[in-house]
Image (cartoon, rainbow, N blue to C red):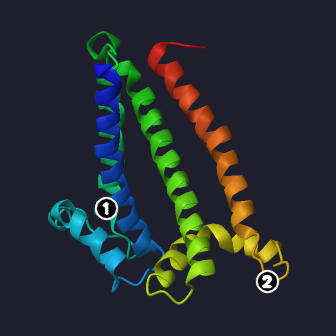
């Protein structure tokens, strides 16, 4: 019971941190306007780490690599701490299991990004139905656009209803099941010596 509670608390802390760092990176990549309350909130809660790190980690092509690094670091710490709480024998395993840790971290990163895309698409769809002229609508529209645009080019609107979010949900769920699930199985195989 203690193990489950500890894993839950670790997951909440590190996944929330990873989410904030990813959103900061992703909002910059999608050119989200930063003059709105949501963007300002993300910037303020991540400034403590990102601002000092930018002195050593320069941006690349206008992207904030410091935020991306902290996203990856938060996921790595989450993976290692959850395995530690579960009783993984780090000392007995040796350095040969590090590829398994890194693959599991990559799978955790991809899983979180996919879940965030699902959430962003869902919020954008709700805002577009309820209050499309809300000041926050452009933020979620810009963040959901990269996932929706390919489907919007293929799937026409039917009676004014955009079905691209439904198609995006299906493809994102398939990505969770097939490549991300396969990556997790491979990582567990490397960590526990499973075939």
The image shows residue 10 at horizontal and vertical percentages of 29, 37
Is 152 left, or right, of 180 in this rendering? right
Residue 36 image point, x, y percent: 35, 83
Answer above or below: position of 153 versus 3.
below
Task: Residue at 57%, 85% (x, y): give it.
Answer: 132
Residue 40: image tag? none
> Splitting the image into 4 quarters, where does residue 4 fall?
top left
Residue to which mark 2 is pinned = 160
Tell me what residue is drawn at x 29 percent, y 37 percent: 9
Q: Quadrant of residue 54?
A: bottom left
Query: Which element type, helix, strand or loop, lies under badge 2?
Result: loop
Say whether disc 1 or disc 2 marks the residue closer to the N-terminus.
1
Quadrant including the C terminus = top right
Q: Position of residue 123 (x, y in %)?
A: 54, 68
The relative height of residue 186 versus residue 105 in the rendered view (above or below) is above
Q: Residues within 10 Å of mark 2 (few under 14, many from 20)?
A: few
Q: Quadrant of the N terminus?
A: top left
State the image coordinates of residue 74 (x, y, percent, origin top left): 31, 46
Residue 45, relative to residue 194: is it above or below?
Answer: below
The reply to whether discs 1 and 2 touch (Cβ–Cβ < 8 Å) is: no
* Disc 1 element: helix
Residue at mark 1:
67
The extreme front residue here reads 130
Q: Is residue 149 left or right of residue 80?
A: right
User: Looking at the image, which is closer to me, 8 or 92?
Assistant: 8
* Residue for point 34% across, 16% down: 88
Marks 1 and 2, Cα distance to the nearest angstrom?
A: 38 Å
Neighbours of disc 1 within 10 Å: few (<14), some (14-19), many (20+): many
């Amino acid at each position: 019971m203690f193990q489950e509670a500890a894993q839950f608390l670790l997951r909440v802390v590190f996944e929330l941190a990873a989410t904030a760092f990813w959103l900061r990176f992703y909002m910059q990549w999608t050119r989200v306007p930063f003059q709105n309350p949501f963007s300002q909130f993300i910037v303020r809660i991540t400034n403590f780490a990102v601002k000092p790190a930018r002195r050593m980690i320069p941006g690349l092509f206008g992207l904030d690599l410091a935020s991306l690094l902290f996203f990856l670091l938060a996921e790595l710490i989450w993976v290692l701490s959850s395995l530690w709480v579960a009783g993984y024998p780090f000392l007995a395993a040796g350095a040969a299991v590090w590829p398994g840790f890194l693959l599991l971290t990559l799978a955790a990163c991809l899983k979180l990004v996919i879940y965030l895309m699902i959430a962003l698409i869902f919020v954008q769809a709700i805002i577009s139905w309820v209050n499309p002229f809300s000041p926050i609508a452009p933020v979620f529209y810009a963040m959901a656009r990269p996932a929706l645009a390919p489907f919007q080019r293929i799937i026409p609107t039917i009676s004014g209803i955009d079905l691209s979010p439904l198609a995006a949900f299906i493809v994102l769920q398939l990505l969770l099941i097939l490549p991300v699930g396969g990556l997790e199985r491979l990582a567990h195989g490397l960590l526990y010596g499973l075939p």
